[in-house]
Image (cartoon, rainbow, N blue to C red):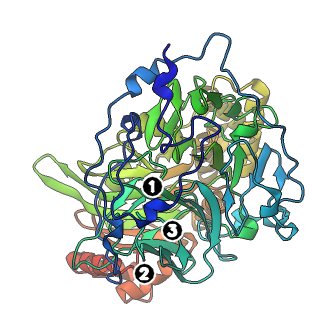
């Protein structure tokens, strides 16, 4: 095999020889940035490519940021790469320096071997790829542990902690990793912003982070090159008000040279809901390793362990090849996505690639991987979805909203409001006829086979085998749904854990036909939970339950979202426990979105003292509330 096809020019990334120097900053004085020649753009297509309409109307962005219109077209070399296999005697590893002792450095040593928590306030630069950051970049003031943060999942709002500021992990055009804390309610980012990024492709005031009711948002301030939020291009539209986009833990912002997705000139910003003192993002320097980095559910110490039943025991590995690094899928059940695309076999990694394995994002930069193994639930972006059926009848009309990770969200509305249609469009069971649903940066409809294992669905009618015990039902479900590499003891442990979570341990030997209605519903949820999905959809789970049992079940769902780390979407007709929900989706006739926000704010929005009164108001004024909500959303108060 000719290995030259993996070589690239010195101004491309990642570096494919260890003596390569970082680019200097002379390009900062240039007016145009041309994309470097690259043969690998095909496999790194932008995720989705929709246009939104933000405009902060406060920019004086100079021509310094103008996109290059002369970027070369890229040839497709990925098909030939897919056929690549390592040599029979395995990958050839370069001789690496001895591992450094991380004691006394900023961050801490943890159970993932040669990895360090990113908790720095000043830049960490990897200009020499063979060396770990110099010790003089660290001070003992930043030695920390996370013992104080073990209760972080108990916050009612985990994606925007009420206890601390959020933070940013910034990878700039010199491939320097640095962190910044969002210490005020509004912070700008740009060449002359509160947070400075010295790059010619970044505008003076490029974007703005804001905090409203403990939720963080980002808006592009009319920048010339725009911003990619999880692969979706945010673009300004003249004379339109700016739009804020809700942020969740691990969201990725990028500023890219046009037609040059793989360039080291591109900027990446990772949003973390954790403050610097509680930051659980970590990195591993691949150049320090003499063996591949294994990624999986049960890998040896010193590798990257992901504790999810969606992940195979040995899911993937990253190994050194020809001076760079290769990602290999080890025949995993649920696969790997890179930059929103499913990959198979071997895949050469490029600068700022985003690897998705289950709910975990892994960022590759300059021979390092950055990751967060916290269970983060799923973020769902619903983008202008409609559903039109026979007779040209619209039963769902242009719904756009964002469900954040680990939220408990209710879908409410009168009969015929399209609640079930909306749910089925969002979970992929009944795709919308227009628009799209983005689940953790992936287009749900085009990546359904990859994502379906992460989706749990509990129908209104319980589908249970009456003559099985509770434990038997869960064991049979686990045997059908879990990876083939799950051994008997691991399966039993998973079932016992689910019984405990759903308060069913005392009923494990009880036949299902002898359970109460509320207990049967908990068994239905447990049967979905056993395969560890990241998001649950439940269709009227409290139907037929008495008020006490309903309250107990709703509290159980709240526990799953806030403490176990699941995103939960529920259709409900009863409102006695609506205060337990983080958000409500209120649909009107014809599947029109009349309101999306907190239950408390809904009272002010509809001008009522109790939410049931809103049903009557919407009944005869659907379009009024649709327009009111859309105007409010464009003003940045919702989403």
Separation (CA) of disc 1 from disc 3? 22 Å
Count neighbours of disc 2 (C-alpha within 10 A) and say few if under 14, some if 14 to 19, many if 20 or more. many
Residue projecting furthest to the top: 88
Q: Is residue 133 left or right of residue 344?
A: right
Write down the residue under mark 2: 602
Q: Secondary structure at mark 1?
A: loop
Along the viewing direction, whichever of 231 and 580 lies nearer the viewer: 231
Query: Does 77 sit above or below residue 355?
Result: above
First in sequence, mark 1 or 3: give its number. 3
Q: Which residue is mark 3?
A: 198
Nearer the camera: disc 2 or disc 1: 1
- Report the quarter where the C terminus lies: bottom left
* For residue 331, above or below residue 248: above
Q: Are marks 1 and 3 in contact (CB under 8 Å)?
A: no
Mark 3 vs mark 2, CA separation in Å: 43 Å
Q: Is residue 524 above or below residue 243?
A: above
- The circle on residue 230 is 1
Q: Position of residue 459 (x, y in %)?
A: 46, 46
Which residue shows up at 29% across the image and 82% down it?
A: 617
Q: Position of residue 69 (x, y in %)?
A: 25, 54
Residue sitting at x 37%, y 47%? 46
Residue 303 to residue 580: above or below: above
Is residue 342 visible in the rendered image? The answer is yes
Residue 56: image location, x then y, percent: 35, 79
**Which residue is at 49% across, 78% downward?**
193
Question: In the visual, does 281 lie left or right of 27?
Answer: right
Q: Nearer the viewer, mark 3 or mark 2?
A: 3
Query: Which badge, 2 or 1, is on the more N-terminal residue?
Result: 1
Q: Could you say whether the residue bearing mark 3 is in a helix, strand or loop? A: loop
Q: Position of residue 424 (x, y in %)?
A: 36, 48
The answer to whether residue 571 shows anywhere in this view is no
């Amino acid at each position: 095999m000719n290995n030259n096809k993996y070589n690239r020019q010195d101004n491309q990334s990642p570096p494919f020889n260890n003596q390569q120097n970082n680019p200097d900053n002379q390009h900062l004085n240039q007016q145009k940035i041309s994309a470097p020649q690259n043969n690998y753009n095909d496999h790194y297509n932008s995720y989705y490519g929709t246009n939104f309409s933000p405009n902060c109307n406060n920019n004086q962005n100079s021509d310094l940021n103008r996109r290059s219109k002369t970027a070369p077209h890229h040839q497709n070399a990925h098909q030939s790469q897919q056929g690549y296999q390592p040599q029979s005697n395995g990958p050839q590893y370069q001789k690496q320096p001895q591992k450094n002792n991380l004691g006394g450095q900023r961050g801490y040593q943890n159970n993932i071997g040669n990895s360090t928590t990113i908790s720095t306030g000043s830049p960490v630069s990897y200009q020499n790829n063979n060396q770990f950051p110099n010790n003089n970049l660290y001070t003992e003031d930043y030695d920390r542990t996370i013992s104080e943060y073990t209760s972080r999942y108990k916050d009612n709002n985990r994606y925007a902690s009420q206890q601390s500021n959020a933070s940013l992990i910034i990878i700039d055009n010199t491939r320097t990793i640095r962190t910044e804390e969002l210490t005020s309610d509004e912070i700008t980012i740009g060449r002359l912003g509160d947070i400075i990024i010295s790059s010619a492709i970044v505008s003076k005031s490029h974007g703005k982070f804001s905090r409203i009711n403990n939720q963080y948002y980002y808006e592009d301030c009319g920048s010339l090159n725009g911003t990619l939020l999880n692969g979706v291009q945010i673009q300004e539209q003249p004379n339109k008000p700016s739009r804020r986009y809700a942020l969740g833990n691990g969201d990725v912002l990028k500023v890219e040279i046009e037609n040059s997705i793989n360039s080291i000139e591109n900027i990446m910003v990772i949003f973390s809901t954790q403050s610097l003192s509680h930051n659980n993002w970590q990195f591993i320097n691949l150049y320090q390793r003499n063996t591949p980095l294994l990624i999986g559910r049960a890998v040896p110490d010193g590798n990257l362990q992901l504790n999810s039943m969606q992940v195979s025991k040995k899911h993937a590995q990253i190994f050194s090849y020809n001076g760079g690094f290769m990602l290999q899928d080890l025949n995993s059940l649920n696969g790997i996505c890179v930059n929103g695309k499913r990959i198979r076999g071997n895949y050469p990694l490029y600068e700022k690639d985003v690897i998705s394995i289950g709910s975990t994002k892994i960022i590759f930069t300059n021979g390092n991987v950055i990751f967060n193994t916290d269970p983060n639930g799923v973020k769902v972006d619903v983008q202008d979805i409609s559903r039109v059926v026979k007779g040209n009848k619209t039963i769902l009309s242009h719904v756009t909203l964002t469900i954040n990770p680990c939220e408990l969200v209710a879908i409410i509305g009168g009969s015929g409001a399209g609640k079930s249609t909306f749910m089925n469009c969002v979970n992929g069971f009944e795709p919308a006829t227009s628009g799209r649903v983005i689940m953790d940066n992936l287009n749900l409809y085009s990546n359904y086979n990859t994502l379906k294992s992460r989706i749990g669905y509990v129908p209104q009618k319980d589908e249970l085998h009456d003559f099985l015990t509770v434990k038997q039902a869960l064991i049979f479900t686990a045997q059908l749904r879990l990876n083939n590499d799950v051994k008997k003891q691991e399966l039993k442990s998973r079932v016992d854990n689910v019984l405990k979570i759903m308060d069913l341990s005392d009923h494990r030997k009880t036949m299902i036909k002898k359970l109460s209605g509320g207990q049967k519903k908990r068994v239905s949820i447990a049967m979905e939970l056993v395969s560890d999905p990241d998001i649950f959809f439940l269709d009227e789970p409290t139907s037929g339950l008495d008020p006490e049992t309903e309250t107990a079940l709703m509290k159980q769902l709240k526990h799953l979202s806030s403490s176990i780390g699941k995103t939960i979407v529920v259709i409900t007709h009863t409102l006695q426990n609506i205060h337990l929900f983080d958000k409500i989706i209120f649909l009107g006739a014809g599947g029109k979105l009349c309101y999306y926000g907190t239950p408390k704010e809904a009272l002010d929005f509809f001008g009522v003292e109790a939410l049931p009164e809103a049903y009557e108001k919407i009944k005869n004024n659907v379009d009024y509330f649709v327009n009111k909500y859309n105007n409010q959303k464009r003003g940045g108060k919702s989403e």
